[in-house]
Image (cartoon, rainbow, N blue to C red):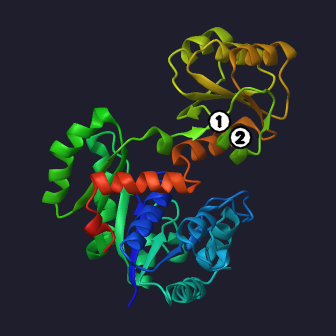
Amino acid sequence: MTDTTLVTSTGDGTGKTAITLALARLARDRGATVGYMKPKGTRLQSSVGKTLDRDPMLAREVLGLDAEVHEMEPVVYSPTFVEGAVRGTEDPDALRDRVRESFDALAADADAMFVEGGGRWTTGGVVDLTDADVAELLDARVVLVTDYDEPGDLDEVLAAADALGDRLAGVVFNRVADAAFDGLEADAVPFLEGRGVPVLGVLPRVRELAGVTVGDLADELGAEVLTDAPTDGFVERFLVGAMSGEEALRHFRRARDAAVITGGDRADVQTAALDASGVRCLVLTGGQRPSGAVLGKAAEAGVPVLAVNADTATTIGRVESIVRGGRTRDEHTVETMADLLADHANVDELVG
């Protein structure tokens, strides 16, 4: 009988992919034959359902799997899909059967299956396929991944734990900053365990997993890179340049490892961003190229300039998703996460 672990989270971009694949890698290293599945594809290129979801492809590469992507990701959870579900054009029972059939095919030769949730644990509720529902459907134990900045973040953890019930194996706190680490271990972990919620790991923040390179950001956005500056710098946050140039400069000078998003016609904001040492790149929206003076200044400063055709609001949403999610796009990042889990988590409990 296949042992099944579902990795879910309290929010988007908490590191589910890295942790799911790292757990599968650790189980494989212990001699188990493993499989991977992501029932709901949530990384989308368009509202009609073309996915950008590279997670199944990465799983194939990292774990040496030969399963078809459509089996590994049977439901494309796009806005159009959700609208159809609300209108009654999607049959929840049929979707559950599709997920179960795909799972059975993938699990046929596996000792252990690792199932990645989509978005947050509540995603899929309109078709009765939240991660709690999927865990019940697949008879899976659940690992809950979450961030932690302050005690109020435990509200989400407790709500998820209540919904998951006895299927919850435990919680893994990921990307915990140094400033929050001591308080989490001294106060929050004992509090949760006193409420019957096991904590199986507290992973420190590691830059290469928390951030995204400028090059990766450009690829994910489909942006044109207008300068020859290096694109290997890390972006860990973004700022929106919607104020005057002088006000923007004061704002940007406080930034560290930031991408600045602004309109392609805002030369004053672009110039201010290039004067701030913590700005790693400019993302210019609206399909408008900056002036030659701005491009010259960017080249001199070694700051990449990315141009996208989308409007500012759309671009903000995409950049937020990319930066919050970090990048788990190669074998090295999965190995790094596996090392973190080995050093800072109860791997025996996590891999079942």
How far separated are the C-alphas under marks 2 and 1? 6 Å
The label on residue 55 is none
Quadrant of the snapshot with the C terminus: bottom left
Image position, residue 87 (x, y; %): 66, 74
Report if the CB atoms under discs 2 and 1 are less than 8 Å apart: yes
Mark 2 surroundings: few (<14), some (14-19) or many (≥20) residues within 10 A: many
User: Does residue 17 appear left or right of residue 289 in this picture?
Assistant: left
Image position, residue 236 (x, y; %): 52, 35
Tell me the amino acid under the disc marked 2: Ala
The label on residue 218 is 2
Residue at the (26%, 68%) spot, across then down: 348
Quadrant of the snapshot with the N terminus: bottom left
Name the residue carrying label 1: 214
Q: Which of 229 and 161 is in front in this view?
A: 229
| Badge 1 element | helix
User: Does residue 281 appear left or right of residue 38 in this picture?
Assistant: right
Q: Can residue 12 be seen in this view?
A: no
Tell me the amino acid under the disc marked 1: Val
Q: Is residue 278 visible?
A: yes
As drawn, 294 above or below 336: above
